[in-house]
Amino acid sequence: IIGNSTSNFGKKVLLIGAGSLGSYVASELAKNGFNNLTIYDGDDLSNENFMRWYYSGIFNAGKKASRLDLFLELMHPEIQVDAHNEDIDATRLIEEMGSADYIIFTIGTSDTQLRLNRILRENSCKAKVLFVWLEAGGQHSHVLRIDYSIPGCFECLFTDKTGDMVNNQ
């Protein structure tokens, strides 16, 4: 078992986003004993984001999810990574949420986060859900934990009572 805690061993994490932030989160998950990760990201690792990616210097091209899978399994052969080189859709999210202990969003678009948040809320997600994001310019970071069994969710930060977008800066 890797990491200092055995309590995370065997827990399944669904990581949505393997870019700048997701690559750092994935590394920390592995270091903290999580050994079962499923990763979704349809983007290519490109010159624009190569310098911000945690493992820059090792890979400079390819799909982010599969490159992250390869690196994690090289560094920690005892973990299981299931990489999907595609963006997660509603059907896959509903399927995956049933077996996930944690769902972590590290994607940069609030429209996509809102859409996926609604799917989780409408389907009574039981997993622990974290929305993690960086402010423009990377000066501030945020982590928001959502418990769908109580009122309030990620959407409250971006919509008013009528559902119109607000605070979407």
Image (tube, grey):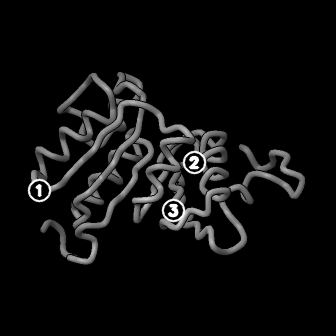
Q: Are marks 3 and 1 in contact (CB under 8 Å)?
A: no
The amino acid beneath tag 1 is: Glu
Query: x, y (%) of residue 16?
Result: 44, 46
Residue 78 - label: 1
Q: Secondary structure at mark 1?
A: loop
The answer to whether residue 113 is left or right of residue 36 is right
Q: CA distance from mark 3 to mark 2?
A: 19 Å
The amino acid beneath tag 2 is: Glu
> Upstream in the sequence, badge 2 or badge 1?
1
The answer to whether residue 96 is left or right of residue 164 is left
Q: Name the residue at 28% across, 44% down.
A: 82
> Upstream in the sequence, badge 3 or badge 1?
1
Choose between 140 and 67: the one closer to the eye.
67
Q: Are marks 3 and 2 in contact (CB under 8 Å)?
A: no
> Upstream in the sequence, badge 3 or badge 2?
3
Residue 100, above or below 54: below
Q: Quadrant of residue 45?
A: top left
Query: x, y (%) of residue 20?
Result: 39, 41
Residue 129 - label: 3
Query: x, y (%) of residue 37?
Result: 30, 53
Residue 120, above or below 152: above
Residue 135 - label: 2
Query: The N terminus lies in which quarter of the figure?
Result: bottom left
Q: Residues within 10 Å of mark 1 (few under 14, many from 20)?
A: some
